[in-house]
Image: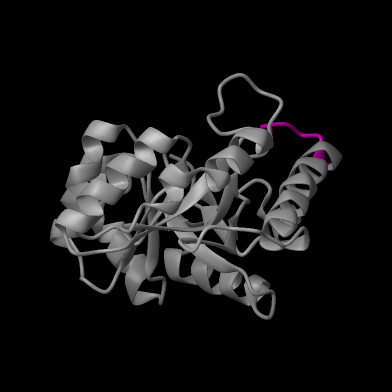
Amino acid sequence: MSVALQIDSLQQKLSGTGCRLVAVTKTRPVEMLLEAWHAGCKAFGENRVQEMAEKYGELPKNIEWHLIGHLQTNKVKYIAPFVSLIHSVESLKLLQEIDKHALKNNRIISCLLQIYIAQEETKFGLSTEEAEALLASPEVAGLAGIRIAGLMGMATFTGNREQIRAEFRSLKQFFEKLKKGPLPANAEMRELSMGMSGDFDIAVEEGSTMIRVGSSIFGSR
């Protein structure tokens, strides 16, 4: 199936759910991204800063660029002028660096706190306790160049769909808990980014507002 047909199929599945599609475009050629853009997909997710910055330079400027991979503090400056949403924030240090470069570019950059929900050693993220402490800290409240817009989580890579569902459900419950506040003025719980090609159907059922899908659109690498 073509990229356009895959996008159309996914958009139909998401219709009425309140969940948006972010096309994961890492390692995909610019021609493929243009195909997705012409098919109406305007939000692209990249894992690597350098690749994202290069593609930004070559593609239409009405694309929303989402940084979905692990972000090192020394790379923030390359995407600060244009990134729409950073999904993978997991430390005060990173938030402070994003804030610094956002202010240099006269921007407020939206961020999601990445929460560790998987039963795997390889995943990044904050514990729920660490996230609550971060949101309660005066250092975060004083940042004028960032907006914490919600949470992101990655489920365990497993065939056990009930485990995946339980992990997504736990993140949604934490999201709802935080939504009830109190939150600093520069934070709100609006976006819940969870669900990828193999598990987005469960994520949507469990309340995701944003799914990150690559291989279901572009085929396996």
149 or 202, which is in the foreground?
A: 149
Q: Main secondary structure of the magenta part?
A: loop
179 or 157, which is in the foreground?
A: 179
Horizontally, is 142 left or right of 187 in the view?
Answer: left
198 or 204, which is in the foreground?
A: 204
> Residue 158: where, in percent of width, then height?
72, 31
Give me the residue at 49% from left, 51% from top: 112
Give me the residue at 69% from left, 74% from top: 17
Colour scheme used in the picture? one colour
Horizontally, is 210 left or right of 72 in the view?
Answer: right
Q: Name the image quarter holding residue 34.
A: bottom left
Q: Identify whether 157 is placed above or below 109.
A: above
> Which residue in the rendered view is the most extreme toward the top?
121
Residue 197 can be seen, yes or no: yes
> Residue 174: where, in percent of width, then height?
73, 49
Horizontally, is 31 left or right of 120 in the view?
Answer: left
Q: Is residue 91 magenta?
A: no
> Residue 99: where, in percent of width, then height?
29, 50
Residue 87 can be seen, yes or no: no
> Which residue in the rendered view is the most extreme toward the bottom?
16
Q: Identify whether 152 is placed above or below 72.
A: below
Range covered by the magenta-colored residues: 156-161
> Residue 77: where, in percent of width, then height?
19, 44
Q: Name the image quarter holding residue 40.
A: bottom left
Give me the residue at 67% from left, 60% from top: 181
Q: Name the image quarter holding residue 92.
A: top left
Q: Is residue 159 magenta?
A: yes
212 or 219, which is in the foreground?
A: 212
